[in-house]
Image (tube, coloured by chain):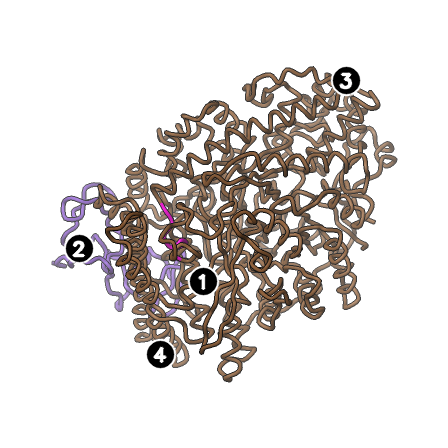
Chain colours: A brown, B purple
Amino acid sequence: MSKAGQSTDDFMECQNEAINYYGNKPGDKVEDREKKQQPTQRAGKARDLYFSAKSSTSMEFPYWYTRCWDELDGEIPIIRRAESLKAGFEHLTPVIYPGELLAMGKASYLRSSYPMPWLSEAFFMASEDKLYKEALESGKLTADTFTTVGKGGGNVTKSVGKVISIAGKFGLRVEEMPVMLEVAKRWKNRSVDDVGHKYEQMVPGYKEKEAIMRSVICMFDSGYTLPQGREVVNYYYPLQYGIDGIIRMCEEGIAEVAGYPEMDRLYFYKGVVTMLQGVKSWILNYAEEARFLASLEKEEKQKAEYTEMAERLEHISANPPRDFHDALQMLWIFHVAVLNEDAISGLSPGRVGQVLYPFWKRDVDRGLIDRAKTIELLECMRIKFTEIDCFASMGVVGGVLSGNTFNNLCVGGLNKDGTSAANELEMLILETGISCETPQPTLSVLYDEKAPEEFLLKGIECTKAGAGYPAWVNNQVAMEFILNNYGHEGMMMEEARAWAIGGCLESSPGSWMPLNLDGMIHWIPGGSAPATSVGVHFISLPKILETVIFDGVDMRTGERIFPSHGYKLETYEEVWQGFRDYFSRAVHVLALTNNVQHDAWRKISPSLVNSMLKPDCLEKGRDLGQMGARYNTTFNIESCGNTTLVNSLASLKKNIYDEKNYSLEAYRKAILDNFGYHTAQETGSYSLVDQKPAEHFSEYRKIHRQSLDAPKFGNDDPYVDAIFKEWEDWFCEMAHNYRSLYDQPMYACQISVSTHGPMGAVTLATPDGRLSGTTFSDGSVSAYPGTDKHGPYALFSSATCWNHSQSQNSQLNMKIHPSVVRGREGSRKFLELIRAYMRKGGFHVQFNIVDSRMLKQAQADPDKFRSLLVRVAGFTQYWVELGKQIQDEVIARTEYEEL
Amino acid sequence: MNTCNDCKFYLPVDVFKGICKLSKNDILPEDNFCEKAERIAKCKFCSKYTAEKEFLGKCMSTTLAYPDMIAAKCADFEWISLN
């Protein structure tokens, strides 16, 4: 059974005291995780350097981009964009750190990022600036003000000396601040954000959209904020043809189309050539720096490594890779190159172990690489991915991403021919996930019944290590979604097997590409669609319900969000109908405004790097925004707070309509008075564990108790599970009624990432007994912390009361005490648990193997826990870099002490 | 007085600190030049740069520029006379 909160009887015994109803009671002794390994000396040093480094931003790339853009006024947009990217790439100052085996990064610091004012410029202006005030008024920045960013680790949370803090995370040298503001102002009325905003106002009901944003019913505009990502990269073309080979392909394309109709193809090919010239210069600048460092170096081994690095970079600046090390370096370069063209989160490398396997196996067979060298390289890869930062507003980077960048690496799944795709290189990828614990790349096992037991047990070993990865994802359920969603675009079973996770948990279509090595064809998987989650991001389900209860008004601010729904709410069916009405209104206007924003993006700032990589853009001569990719049904609608919504509906149904314990008016009063408790903002704690009663709390004691005791999702209780299923079936179906910019149906996406923190912060108490300002339930099928009281199998039954393949995903987060899975017997038991969930049709489950008391200690004394990693919702992050809202929620999650 | 931030041997780790490529010691961007230091190409050391106000200026009298930008890859960079 779970070590959940107290029972009703316990509660009754302490009626006159504050309730510790949810969450866990710490025991006596803190237990550490079982598996502890150390990285190689090289990776260990690199990770120590990472730990010492702060998130840093610079103006080099945006300065040159903007300068070039201004010089090319009047040029064809995609050519102007390509030249600007080229200027950015070729002027980046190379930085190579001692001991690196993989070179290059986003910009000239270890944890580098930079503003992209061509996308959006208002959020990093000073708060007194007019641009900032305008953005605040339109609701674009409201989420920022309710977001907490982690105070420790690499975040630059305040300005110190000659460093300015931006968005509570990024440091900028004071000497670059004036140029940042100057460059930003030059994009006013020209950025994707501004141009999109101009036209989104033409959408009927636009004012309602602004009110929705101000109330944080929706977390952020996805059309320009993070216009790419939540997708899988495809590295095939550079690995097969090399940069010069791709340039030749484009030159042939130019010769073929110049002067003929569909001239856009000409500009696309020319743009790719231009961009690649910039990427070549960027690589060669690094090669030059490596040679410079070699010239300074006295130590022979390091000197040789610099020389070898220079030679490698020079080679792959033009040619396909010769070996595994070359291929890994090239993969990394193009991964970063994509990240440098847009603000991106969730750019997943995908099934890297299968993409690189032919190179690695050939090296092994030739005796060129051994296990130790492979481990060292893979650990270096982990460090490089962990260095990735994304420069975005506080609401996005803190409230949604928690500073994470979601580079998801998948292992397992099936080959093109339907056999298990798990391989020896993937075993080593899992191994390095244990030996070199870092947040990136996060790992996901594509669980399939055909996977070898040894492979699955290696995955278990990695999960037990406690870094929160791998997540376990159901290969068959995902393939069913992929086939259903992309079938009308020609997706067949064979190609559905090439899917992978893009971002934290977005099922993304792939393709099999024929890698020819020494005359032998190896079918390697890679992403085959643009961003699979641009759309409506994220909708706060409990906040929508709040507006239903108060007839369209956000009672926190007093602002009317929706027109009166016109129902008296005399029946449960009217509540449910009111919810569906408001939810549909919100989705309708947000889908349209997002389409406008994304249209501005594809016109002003079309993708070149990512387009070049994705099949079939090069073949078609079209970028991603012109549907150059093979699959384009990629817009979604994201929910947040599923379980809080469903538990609230169950409470209303039971207490008002079925048993008639209370009137709706009594609930309205209790909600407005927060059941007699102080709010989370007042207490500074965002989980229910530590909430403090106000003087008059006894007035609401009974209604609060009965709200808490109403049926809760996660206990295999048909009363509440039926409500959950009704919600899911309706949501997954209604999402198809909305059309994307590419005139394709949209689909449901159910992940919370970190939004359940800030969205909970602006939401009053909910009818399930949750208090005002506290976080919502995490994920989409997780139980609310402490309410799943009948063990994991009951939770699994609840979670699978609906068909998960209707949605792009579902998300289940669990916390297990380390003692439960200790030893080989524990591993077997653990695998059986996961298997049981997968066999019931669960799409995804991930675990924190951690003692909650350790998290409490880490919250109190973060400096001692710099390297502690936890799983949030689809990602792993350093504890000290999480905002307090999310820290409190993770601590409060139910901790299983038995399976 | 030049500082390490202006040196071609300065390897920035983040906005607060860096590593000397020669000594491999941890250093700060504000540390003074040592005897082995050499200037790195920056706009403020370029003959085509004109300062206008603090941390802002013009490149070739026409284009926005800023003094601390590294110009090692700028085709128009030209060292100013150090006299």
* Residue type at the position of mark 3: Ser
Segment tinted magenta in the rendering? A606-612
Q: CA distance from mark 3 to mark 4?
A: 81 Å
Q: Which residue was labeled with disc 4?
A: A298
Secondary structure at numbered mark 4: loop
Calculate the distance from the C-alpha at mark 1 to the C-alpha at mark 4. Answer: 36 Å
Q: Label 3 to label 1, Cα distance in Å?
A: 60 Å
Q: Are marks 1 and 2 on the same chain?
A: no
The answer to whether residue B29 is left or right of residue A614 is: left
Mark 1, secondary structure of its residue:
loop
Which chain does tag 4 point to? A
Which residue carries the number 2 mark?
B46
Q: A416 or A28: nearer the eye? A: A416
Q: Earlier in the sequence, mark 3 or mark 1?
A: 1
Q: Between residues B15 and A323, which one lies in front from this camera angle?
A: A323
How far is the residue under mark 2 from the one under mark 4? 32 Å
Q: Which mark is residue A235?
A: 1
Dot 1 surroundings within 10 Å: few (below 14), some, or many (20 or more)? many
Residue A167, quarter of the rendered image: top left
Task: Check disc 3 and report the residue beneath it.
Answer: A663
In this rendering, do the residues under marks 2 and 4 share a single chain? no
Of the residues shown, which amino acid type is indicated by label 4? Lys
Q: Could you tell whether A494 is left or right of A812 in the image?
A: left
Quadrant of res B53:
top left
Q: Residues within 10 Å of mark 4 (few under 14, many from 20)?
A: few
Coordinates of residue A355 in the picture (x, y in percent): 51, 66
Residue for point 77% across, 56% down: A836
Q: Amino acid at mark 2?
A: Cys
